[in-house]
């Protein structure tokens, strides 16, 4: 490895690097992010190796394994460059045909292409697939081009040029000013302006200052930070080094949860390679700037994503938050001025330094500039990671990119902002996503989790679920959060299980106020959001649960009963055999009846009842009809069979 001694040496090295896009030598790009890994990308990679030898193509084609492309629903994904041909859900058996047809004969394998659900046409090119077409992948885009293990790949796409620019053409103050001018707001939670935070640290007294990447990412369903660290670790290191230069720091940490083994592996390797090239370490590129980075594996507690708890954990103590009488950018890690930013925030920095704040501020809304990555999950056709310009309406994200709700179900709500975010109803689908826009309607941007819910989701149960998560994850240090959440969880559980009573909602509202006013950290302060937002937009569901013991979505187990419609039952025995509680009584050609005493509402009877009969029904808020007398249950003799 060459130890680069100057920016000129780096530029020289860069000239000799190419990213396999020559038309004479096609490149097979195989997505190998965690989701594609789970759906079998290793087996596909092995099949590619085998077929390259078998078809004698080893010298004719490049193969590159990259990080996450985002379209996780359809993995494993292969893209053939330079033509940009995209194949989805690849199995090892498909590989021989891809090589012989597409690589050798330049023909497309139709059956492996994406199908446009509206036009019912096959789509050849990745950029034309609706999931990608409406995105603006500034931060995530390189994930699909480079191998995360190769620093040369990153250099070939212009990597580390922003660091060179900062170190050789800008003063630290100018870097801070550029970030301030860009109005880059933190992508990990509150949306605090990064430039102002950096300035505070730069101006704070003290010789030792730190920079930290927050890669704790504890929100259920969110995985954008993991995918960035796995797929493009150098972009985060580059941003971090620029930040360190700007604030006067020589030491940085990446706080990443240990459940992210691939992210830990790739970022650790990236640090090693950058040190070998002289892009991290002492006297970087001969500019006199020293900067070292260490990886710290967090034990995986949600509260450790909170800035002060994270720093306490980094110091080797129990990860609990501390009061913020003085901001952590002035007194943070080991009481030294510290800049903590989210993974995606850091990844935006090289782009801003390279392209300029004026370019960045052209993207987005008045108050929210640039793009935002969301992990689009839940009841959505195209689960995956999407990056959109700030200001895109929720409707476009969910329907144009996400492909809408599967199974012909109706959209009900979308939860943004992680477990302490809010649930937004259909009326707000035209809301443009942005920090202030989301806060105004009772939700928040958070780190970018976006959970879509359909008509079968009970909003009271959703609030209970998130409050349950937060109760478990509360560190217990402050009483309002520890006890308040426990109490909220108890009341919500009672409501979901049919024990709700008048006054519960008022008590929940009072508890919410205490939690947000009196909790020590953001966990408790924002914890009432799932309750408050569901109450604001779906109050009638709470009232129906409490007064009529009726769950509108027919989802709360304690409020539903299963009943077999005697008009439709064919006495086929299937539900009787499958019921784990032996609650279905009957016999062959006899109308089946559910013994309500024994039934634990698991729903297996409904799942297994053949669609053509559709005899099992769910009911809520009304009495179960009386069972027909035993003597009339023989099919053909009673109940109109
Ligand atoms: C309970 C809790 C958990 C948090 N988890 C994360 C997290 O996983 N990742 C993150 O970047 N920020 C998280 N935050 C926000 C951080 O406290 C902090 O604001 C953020 O890392 C600052 O970076 P940013 O300005 O770039 O967003 C969390 C906050 C709270 C209250």
Image (cartoon, rainbow, N blue to C red):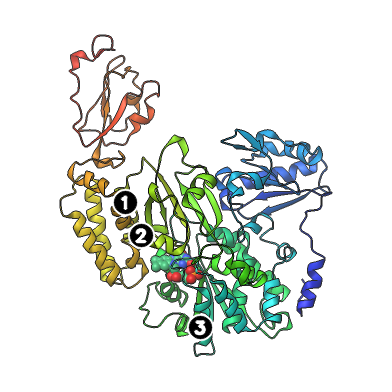
Label 1: how many residues lie within 10 Å, few (<14), some (14-19) or many (20+)? some
Label 2: how many residues lie within 10 Å, few (<14), some (14-19) or many (20+)? some
Q: Secondary structure at mark 2?
A: loop
Mark-to-mark CA distance, 1 and 2? 10 Å
Residue tagged 1: 537
Residue at position x 79%, y 77% in the image? 8
Mark-to-mark CA distance, 1 and 3? 41 Å
Nearer to us of marks 2 and 3 is: 2
Q: Which image quadrant is residue 326 in?
A: bottom left
**Mark before the other along the chain sequence, 1 or 2:** 2
Residue tagged 2: 442
**Mark before the other along the chain sequence, 1 or 3:** 3
Residue at position x 37%, y 74% in the image? 321
Q: Position of residue 639 (x, y in %)?
A: 24, 14
Q: Secondary structure at mark 1?
A: helix
Q: Are marks 1 and 2 in contact (CB under 8 Å)?
A: yes
Circle on res. 78 = none
Mark-to-mark CA distance, 2 and 3? 31 Å
Q: Which corner quadrant of the figure contains ligand 1? A: bottom left
Number of marks in the image? 3
Residue tagged 3: 201
Instruction: Look at the picture and state if 85 lies above or below 523.
Output: above
Q: Position of residue 567 (x, y in %)?
A: 28, 18
Label 3: how many residues lie within 10 Å, few (<14), some (14-19) or many (20+)? many
Instruction: Look at the picture and state if 88 lies above or below 438.
Output: above
């Amino acid at each position: 490895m060459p130890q680069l001694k100057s920016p000129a040496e780096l530029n020289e090295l860069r000239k000799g690097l190419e990213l396999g896009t020559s038309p004479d030598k096609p490149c097979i790009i195989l997505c190998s992010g965690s989701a594609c890994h789970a759906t079998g990308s290793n087996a596909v990679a092995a099949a590619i190796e085998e077929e390259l030898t078998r078809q004698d193509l080893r010298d004719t084609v490049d193969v590159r394994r990259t990080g996450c492309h985002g379209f996780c629903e359809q993995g494993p994904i292969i893209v053939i460059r330079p033509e940009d041909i995209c194949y989805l859900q690849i199995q090892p058996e498909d590989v021989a045909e891809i090589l012989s047809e597409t690589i050798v004969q330049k023909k497309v394998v139709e059956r492996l292409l994406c199908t446009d659900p509206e036009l019912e046409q096959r789509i050849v090119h990745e950029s034309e697939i609706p999931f990608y077409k409406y995105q603006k992948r500034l931060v995530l885009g390189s994930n699909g081009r480079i191998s995360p293990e190769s620093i040369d790949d990153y250099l070939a796409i212009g990597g580390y040029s922003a660091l060179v620019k900062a170190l050789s053409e800008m003063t630290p103050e100018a870097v801070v000013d550029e970030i301030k001018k860009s109005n880059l707001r933190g992508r990990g939670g509150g949306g605090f302006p990064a430039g102002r935070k950096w300035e505070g640290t730069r101006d704070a007294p003290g010789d030792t200052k730190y920079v930290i990447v927050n890669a704790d990412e504890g929100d259920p369903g969110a995985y954008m930070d993991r995918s960035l660290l796995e797929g493009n670790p150098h972009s985060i290191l580059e941003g971090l080094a620029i930040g360190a230069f700007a604030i006067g720091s020589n030491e940085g940490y990446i706080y990443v949860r240990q459940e992210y083994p691939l992210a830990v592996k790739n970022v650790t390797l990236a640090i090693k390679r950058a040190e070998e090239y002289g892009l991290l370490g002492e006297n970087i590129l001969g500019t006199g700037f020293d900067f070292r980075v260490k990886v710290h594996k967090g034990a995986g507690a949600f509260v450790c994503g909170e800035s002060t708890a994270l720093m306490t954990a980094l110091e080797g103590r129990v990860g609990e938050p501390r009061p913020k009488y003085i901001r952590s950018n002035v007194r943070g890690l080991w009481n030294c001025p510290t800049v903590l930013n989210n993974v995606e925030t850091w990844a935006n920095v090289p782009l801003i330094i390279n392209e300029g704040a004026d370019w960045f501020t052209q993207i987005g809304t008045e108050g929210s500039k640039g793009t935002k990555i969301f992990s689009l999950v839940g009841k959505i056709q195209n689960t995956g990671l999407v990056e959109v310009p700030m200001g895109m309406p929720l409707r476009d994200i969910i329907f144009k990119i996400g492909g809408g709700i599967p199974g012909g179900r109706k959209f009900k709500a979308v939860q943004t902002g992680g477990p302490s975010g809010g649930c937004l109803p259909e009326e707000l689908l035209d809301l443009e996503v942005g920090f202030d826009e989301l806060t105004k309607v009772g939700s928040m941007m958070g780190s970018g989790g976006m959970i879509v819910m359909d008509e079968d989701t009970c909003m009271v149960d959703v609030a209970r679920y998130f409050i349950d998560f937060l109760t478990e994850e509360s560190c217990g240090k402050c009483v309002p959060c520890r006890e308040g959440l426990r109490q909220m969880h108890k009341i919500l559980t009672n409501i979901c299980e049919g024990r709700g009573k008048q006054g519960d909602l008022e008590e929940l509202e009072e508890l919410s106020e205490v939690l947000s006013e009196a909790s020590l950290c953001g966990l408790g302060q924002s914890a009432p959001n799932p309750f408050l937002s569901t109450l604001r937009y779906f109050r009638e569901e709470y009232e129906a649960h409490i007064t009529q013991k009726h769950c509108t979505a027919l989802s709360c187990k304690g409020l539903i009963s299963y009943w077999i419609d005697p008009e439709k039952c064919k006495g086929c025995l299937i539900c009787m055999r499958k019921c784990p509680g032996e609650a279905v009584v009957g016999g062959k050609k006899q109308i089946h009846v559910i013994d309500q005493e024994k039934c634990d509402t698991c729903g297996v009877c409904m799942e297994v009842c053949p669609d053509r009969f559709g005899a099992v029904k769910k009911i809520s808020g009304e009495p179960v009809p009386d069972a027909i007398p035993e003597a009339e249950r023989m099919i053909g003799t009673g109940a109109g069979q």
